[in-house]
Image (cartoon, grey):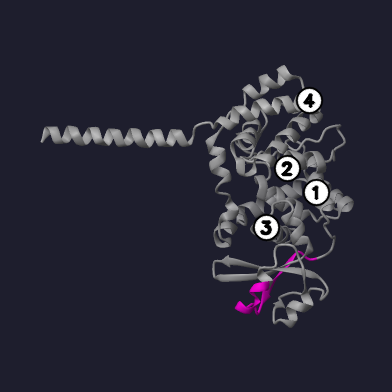
């Protein structure tokens, strides 16, 4: 009996060690990581004039993190709408949005006047991205971007480009690359701009000589508004509306893609009815979302598509839109 217990214990220990070894093997730094760093250092020296020794010291501090690979492999946008919506469209996030709006009312009004983007959309973006600056990201940006650039072949080219942009941004805006924190995908600051977007669309809205998306609410608000204007936001036009009458025969419209390409008049002729007033010649996409009470159908109009340029997901755009409407409703009811 005692020998049986010992044998079983040995087998259990061996199994535990096997599982531990497999887990550590899957989390091991791939050979491509160090090779990629070395090649990147040479590229940044040759193409952008960075000092090789300083780059080497910097990249020696970059660490491969399996948790980043795991996180990007299971994005929230993979959820259904009934699972996704409760994460972002909540009473508390709406109330905090009203508070953020009240605290920055003059800046939001100035941003709307300059860029044409309504305050509720700007506030909702910041609310969805970082809950108004409460959650700026827990990953060192250098680790995130280097891990994805050199350890994630599926999108390695893209993230190698973002690592380049991050280094150029750091040189331009005097950002400490070793202490900057962000998302698992290397998104930065309150609006979670990836480095290339930061360089292209961020603005110095408080005119202090820097574009600071971590500490300056003015720069954050102005930069979100700038982003939307540059991507074609149309002031005064609707974003989306519920639609009824959708049947299985309308599948081709659902398959037409995210970009609005179908005239509202054509959808009407096919029996699909917008629930609110929409111009007949407007282009729309037909969107199906799995809601709490079954399938929901929406028309994605031009401004809805503009929101998806921030994050290429209908779920994301709908969360931003619905949060914006809740914030607007609450602020009006309390005003």
Q: CA distance from mark 3 to mark 2?
A: 20 Å
Q: Secondary structure at mark 3?
A: helix
- Would you call the spot at circle 2 few (<14 residues within 10 Å), some (14-19), or many (20 or more)? many
Q: Secondary structure at mark 2?
A: loop
Image quarter (top left, top right, bottom left or bottom right) of the N terminus: top left
Q: Are marks 3 and 4 in contact (CB under 8 Å)?
A: no
Q: CA distance from mark 1 to mark 2?
A: 10 Å
Residue 247 magenta-drawn? yes
Q: CA distance from mark 4 to mark 1?
A: 31 Å
Mark sitting earlier along the chain (1/3): 1
Residue 320 magenta-drawn? no
How many dots with numbers?
A: 4
Give the image location of residue 54, x and y in percent: 72, 19
The residue under label 1 is 227
Mark sitting earlier along the chain (4/1): 4
Give the image location of residue 327, x and y in percent: 70, 57
- Would you call the spot at circle 1 few (<14 residues within 10 Å), some (14-19), or many (20 or more)? many
Q: Which residues are magenta?
A: 238-252
The residue under label 3 is 323
């Amino acid at each position: 009996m005692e020998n049986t217990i010992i044998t079983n214990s040995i087998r259990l220990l061996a199994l535990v060690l096997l599982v531990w070894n497999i887990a550590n093997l899957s989390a091991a730094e791939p050979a491509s990581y160090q090779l990629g760093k070395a090649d990147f250092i040479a590229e940044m020296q040759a193409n952008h004039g960075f000092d090789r020794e300083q780059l080497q010291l910097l990249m020696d501090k970059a660490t491969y993190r399996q948790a980043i690979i795991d996180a990007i492999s299971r994005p929230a946008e993979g959820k259904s709408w009934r699972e996704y919506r409760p994460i972002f469209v909540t009473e508390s996030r709406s109330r905090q949005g009203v508070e953020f709006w009240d605290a920055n009312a003059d800046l939001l009004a100035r941003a709307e006047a300059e860029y044409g983007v309504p305050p509720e959309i700007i506030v909702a973006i910041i609310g969805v991205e970082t809950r108004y600056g409460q959650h700026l990201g827990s990953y060192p940006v250098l680790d995130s971007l280097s891990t994805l650039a050199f350890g994630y072949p599926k999108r390695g080219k893209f993230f190698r480009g973002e690592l380049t942009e991050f280094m150029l941004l750091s040189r331009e805006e005097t950002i400490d690359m070793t202490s900057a924190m962000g998302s698992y995908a290397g998104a930065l600051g309150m609006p979670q701009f990836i480095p290339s977007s930061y360089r292209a669309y961020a603005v110095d809205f408080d005119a202090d000589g820097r574009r600071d998306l971590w500490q300056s609410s003015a720069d954050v608000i102005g930069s979100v508004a700038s982003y939307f204007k540059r991507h074609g936001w149309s002031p005064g036009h609707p974003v989306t509306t519920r639609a009824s009458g959708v049947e299985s025969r309308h599948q081709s419209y659902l398959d037409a893609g995210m970009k609005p390409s179908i005239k509202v008049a054509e959808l009407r002729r096919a029996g699909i009815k917008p629930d609110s007033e929409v111009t007949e010649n407007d282009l729309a996409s037909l969107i199906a979302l799995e809601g709490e009470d079954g399938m929901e159908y929406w028309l994605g109009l031009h401004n809805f598509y503009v929101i998806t340029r921030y994050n290429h997901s209908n779920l994301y755009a709908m969360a931003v839109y619905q949060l914006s409407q809740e914030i607007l409703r609450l602020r009006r009811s309390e005003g």
